[in-house]
Image (cartoon, rainbow, N blue to C red):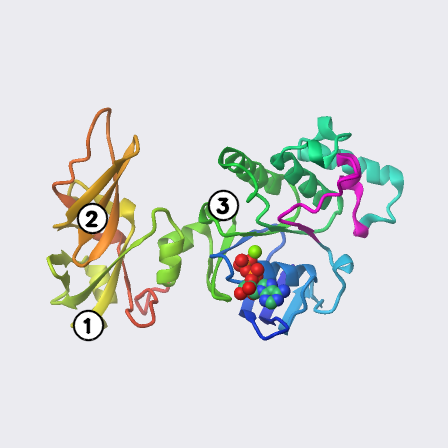
Amino acid sequence: MHELVLKNVDKIYPGGVQAVYDFNIEIEHGEFIVLVGPSGCGKSTVLRMLAGLEEISAGDMILNGERVNHVAPADRDISMVFQNYALYGHMSVYQNMGFSRTIQHEALDTLHEKVMEAASVVQLEPELNRYPRNLSGGQRQRVALGRSIVSSAKVILMDEPLSNLDAKLRVESRRALAKLHQQLDNTFVYVTHDQTEAMTMATRIVVMNGGRIQQIGTPFEVYHWPENMFVGGFIGSPAMNFVYGQIRDGRFVNEGLDLEIPDELKETIKSYSGKEIILGIRPEHFTTAPNNGHAPVKAVENSTEYLGNHALVYLTLGTNDCIANIKLEGMGVEADTSELYIDMNRAHFFDSESEKRIRSEEKVS
Ligand SMILES: Nc1ncnc2c1ncn2[C@@H]1O[C@H](COP(=O)(O)OP(=O)(O)O)[C@@H](O)[C@H]1O
Ligand SMILES: [Mg+2]
């Protein structure tokens, strides 16, 4: 049985703004689900509906087999870590971690045990008597997380918990959270606009845009097999390049562009012969040396950024601006971009109207 299910869930705010459309997901116990998408796409709204802080306008929420649409937040086996951590300024770290509506009737000695256990997990034992104002952003975040652990809720919800941290601490906290998830027996549902956080922590990613799910998949799946141009462009950094052109005689052509397409891919797009199509190619799939299935391109190089072990080359390809991410081998080597190739084995094609990735009919991948 799935632990948590959302079925055809809509959210329409009073006033008429529809923030979420037909949201469907089945979550297993122990998953680390990350909802990712641009600001305003409805991520927090979904999370707040899970917590019971927002009413579900249509559809069902099922927790451990029971419909919980109208169950109060405190009566759901769910705990939420807020973006601003919602810590009480007049309470110590110890008190903040032990304070939760779901555990107010707990015997004091069990509660003490739980707080101490959580403090050890989030590494706050030395800080237990301090107050939130004397803590760093990272420590406050760990207090909020510790409180969720103490609450014993099976499902922990987190809304952009790392957004107030500086870059270095964000990277550390990302790793700490992923590790924590492995240690704990909880399901995490985590919201972020940062695709790197999604890629590094999630067991499954839910990519959202405009209130709608674009794709649900593992980090591997959303990176390698994006459902549509939105996912292709949102996951991965720098973003996937999109080049407009046509298919002619089994080749991808446009002004100054004429690319051979590997046989398997050619078969996939055979119904597009003579039609407009969009090539999707990731910056990391440009190379400076030919290989099997690599197509040479005549690109106009506009500028290059050297970043130590790789260089970002800004190009014009056909009529589109692109970025190539070229690996640099050895010291003091400049990228020789006089000849550039695209690894067409890694290319995708998208339908220019639906913006969906064109996939072969037999092979659903
Ligand atoms: N309480 C509210 N009342 C009306 N509209 C809201 C409310 N909260 C959010 N919205 C709108 O719903 C949409 C989704 O918001 P939100 O879920 O906060 O997005 P995200 O977390 O992805 O940035 C936005 O258009 C936002 O303006
Ligand atoms: Mg939000």
Q: CA distance from mark 1 to mark 3?
A: 38 Å
Magenta residues? 79-102
**Amino acid tagged 1:** Lys
Expressed as whole percent of the image width and height from the top left, the position of residue 121 reads: 68, 34
Judged from the image, the quadrant occupied by ligand 2 is bottom right
Q: Is mark 2 within 8 Å of ligand 1?
A: no
Q: Which residue carries the number 3 mark?
A: 197
Q: Of marks 2 and 3, which one's residue comes earlier in the chain?
A: 3
Q: CA distance from mark 2 to mark 3?
A: 28 Å
Kindly identify the residue that appears in the image at 24 percent across and 26 percent down. 330
Q: On the rendered structure, is 181 left or right of 93?
A: left
Q: Write down the quadrant of residue 358 in the picture.
A: bottom left
Vertical placement of residue 349 versus 187, above or below: below
Whether residues under marks 1 and 3 lie with C-beta atoms below 8 angstroms apart, the answer is no
- Secondary element under disc 1, as helix, strand or loop, is loop
Looking at the figure, which quarter contains the C terminus?
A: bottom left
**Amino acid tagged 2:** Leu
Q: On the rendered structure, is 132 left or right of 158?
A: right
Q: Which residue carries the number 2 mark?
A: 315
* Viewer-closest of 301 and 362: 301
